[in-house]
Each structure stands twice: as C-alpha cells, then as structure tokens.
Amino acid sequence: MTELEQAMIARFGENRVQAYERVEGDACDLLLLSLEKNSAVTVVMTNGLSEKQMKVPEKFNQRKRCELYFCLPDYWEWEEVENPQMNWVFVWIQKLAKHLLENETWYGPGHSFPAGNPPAEISKTMHQKFFMLSDPLLLETELQPVNLQNGEEVFFYAIIPLFEDEFDFKAAKTTVKFLKKFTAKRHTEKLDDFRESIRKLRYRIF
C-alpha cells in the first residue's frame, strides 16, 4: 500500500478508497475514491505519480510532487472498460502520467495538452480536444494537499477537458481569466457530457 493510499483511507475511510492496479502498458496504479458532493462522484486518481520529484520553477518550489485525477459524475459507468464513451478517462490519465514519468518535465495548474496529434475529440459524446490541469474546484476541500512522512506535500491536479475555442481563449487571455469565466458558469472539474463551450454565443431573437 502506498503512502498516498494510506493518506486517502485516513481522510475518507477505507470503504471509500479502492485500489485499481495497473495492467500491462500502464504507467502507474490508480485509486478510485467514492465521494459525496451533493450527488455521488467517483475520483479516478493516479497512485504513485508523486514518487517522482519534479524539477519545478522556483515559484512552484513547494509543488514538486503531484497526482492527477478525473472527477466522474454519478451516471458515469466507469466499470464499462470496453466502452470508449466511458473508458477514455483511464486511457488519458495513463498517457499524462507516462508523459511526466518518462520526460524531464513538470506539471502545474494551468498546463494544457492536446488530445492527440493532431487534436481530436475525446469521444463521441465529449467533443473537447484538449485537457487542462487545475487545482481542485468542486473538490477543493476534499483534495487539499497531503503531507508525506518526509515533510513534502503532494498536490492534486484535476484534468479538465477543454473545447478548442476555450483552449485558444486560455492561451490568449491567461488561465486566470479562463477559470474566472469557467467557474462563473458553475462549471467544475466534474465531467459533463452535456457541457457547452463557455465561448458559445447565444443569439437573442427580439
């Protein structure tokens, strides 16, 4: 059992934490957290990514270790491992973990990534083509950093799908301005098959 898993059990209870071991080709193990936020959510989280100490810029010196997660709504049938409308979260969390583990890079809030080269829609129901990392929004309280025994902290970064025009807006106007608009529409890291771009225009007929 990893130190992270022990910390999650201490925080949420053993009945809410499930280990999800890697299969051949995966970059790291995962944890599944069953939480309640008005309605039930399932958190799919990397379990061990924080074992790598990242070489971060000085301003992020306290954020040398991180774990990534997706937040799934209660209707999400994550057990359907053969369903491409559901299982892409496992595919992409492993891809992002592998990229960090195998390259001299670092992750921080605001970092974004294309869903493929060239960028392609994530699935038939999720038309976003990019991902962005963010500090927890919906789970801000639940996923406060974890203190390790060596005194270092592990930070949790939500993976948020972005539409192409949202990615362009973020690149042009900064992450701060994007998140201000994003959260103003009451969006969070919880996946939503029905979410529209915050840049979508609504025309009024008078």
Image (cartoon, grey):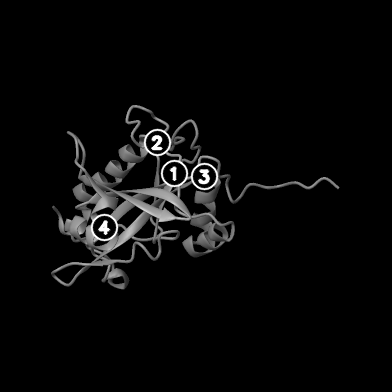
Label 1, on which residue? 74
Label 4, on which residue? 13
Q: Answer yes or no: is residue 52 visible.
A: no
Q: Are marks 1 and 2 in contact (CB under 8 Å)?
A: no
**What's the residue at 71%, 47% (across, down)?**
202
Q: CA distance from mark 3 to mark 2?
A: 23 Å
Q: Are marks 4 and 3 in contact (CB under 8 Å)?
A: no
Q: CA distance from mark 4 to mark 1?
A: 19 Å
Query: Left or right of 189: which side holds 106?
Result: left
**What's the residue at 27%, 63% (across, down)?**
11
Residue 133, position as x, y percentages in the image: 39, 55
Q: What kind of residue is marked 1? A: Asp
Label 2, on which residue? 77
Q: What kind of residue is marked 3? A: Phe
Secondary-structure class at tag 4: loop
Secondary-structure class at tag 2: loop
Q: Is label 1 or label 3 in front?
A: 1
Q: Answer yes or no: is residue 59 visible.
A: yes
Residue 43, position as x, y percentages in the image: 35, 49
Label 3, on which residue? 163
Upstream in sequence: badge 4 or badge 3: 4
Q: What kind of residue is marked 2? A: Glu
